[in-house]
Amino acid sequence: EPIIRQRVHQFIHKYMNHTLFDYTIREFKNGEELLVDEKYYHLIFLDIDMPGRNGIEVASKCRERGQDGLIIFLTGLDALSKEGYKVNAFRYIGKSEGDAAISEAIKSACKILEGQKKILVTKKRGETLPIKISDILYFEASGRGSKIYTQKESFEITKQIGLLGKELEHYGFYPVHR
């Protein structure tokens, strides 16, 4: 429904403007348009009752394609809400619940997404890999690059300590000097 899409769009835009996330909002008129799109989405709002495939079916197809982003269902159909567990839905918001429910869902989703944020680092052997920021314990200078420590392993990377520190300072990492 265009009115609900517009409300969700406004809430996302309003909330995201106060975060450190780079974001793009894409709207689709139906689930088929979403399924044709090849992009990865971190947060997906779906109506359960849509023309063509219902929201549960669309979410299932998204999961089959490797979309592991958070799914929030907006629905007036409580009968199908239990089916959402099969696609690991993050939230269900009844269309009658109002703006506070949408706002809370967006805030909660952003907290989870913040914990899943990753940085791309290039190891000294030239291999590039993503590291979840929440997995990083600390980092230190190592020769001309840096060394990142997680609970499981450590990585020698080519990025200088100053640049790495700048990239991670928004996530609670602070430089410690001797």
Image: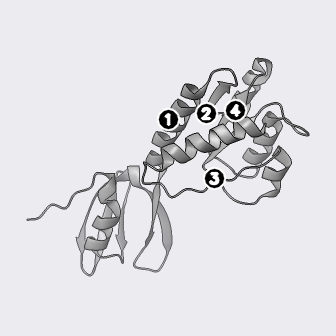
Dot 2 or dot 3, earlier in sequence: 3
Q: Residue at x 43, y 49 (%)?
A: 19
Distance, label 4 to label 1, CA atoms, is: 14 Å
Answer whether labels 1 and 2 touch (C-beta < 8 Å). yes
Identify residue for label 3: 25
Residues under labels 2 and 3: Cα distance? 18 Å
Quarter of the image that includes the N terminus: top right
Q: Earlier in the sequence, mark 4 or mark 1?
A: 4
Viewer-nearest of discs 4 and 3: 3
Q: Could you tell which of marks 2 and 4 lies nearer the N-terminus? A: 4
User: Mark 4 — residue?
Assistant: 73
Horizontal arrangement in the rendering, residue 160 relative to residue 62 (left or right): left
Write down the quadrant of residue 85 in the picture: top right
What amino acid is at disc 3? Ile
Relative vertical location of residue 107 with respect to residue 139 in this rendering, above or below: above
Q: Compute the Cα span from label 1 to label 3.
A: 18 Å
Please, what is the three-letter code of the amino acid marked with disc 2?
Phe
Residue 99 left/right relative to 131? right
- In front: mark 1 or mark 3? 3
Q: Report helix, strand or loop for mark 2.
A: loop
Task: Give, as a three-letter code, the residue at label 4.
Answer: Phe
Q: In the rendering, at what x and y percent does residue 173 appear?
A: 27, 55
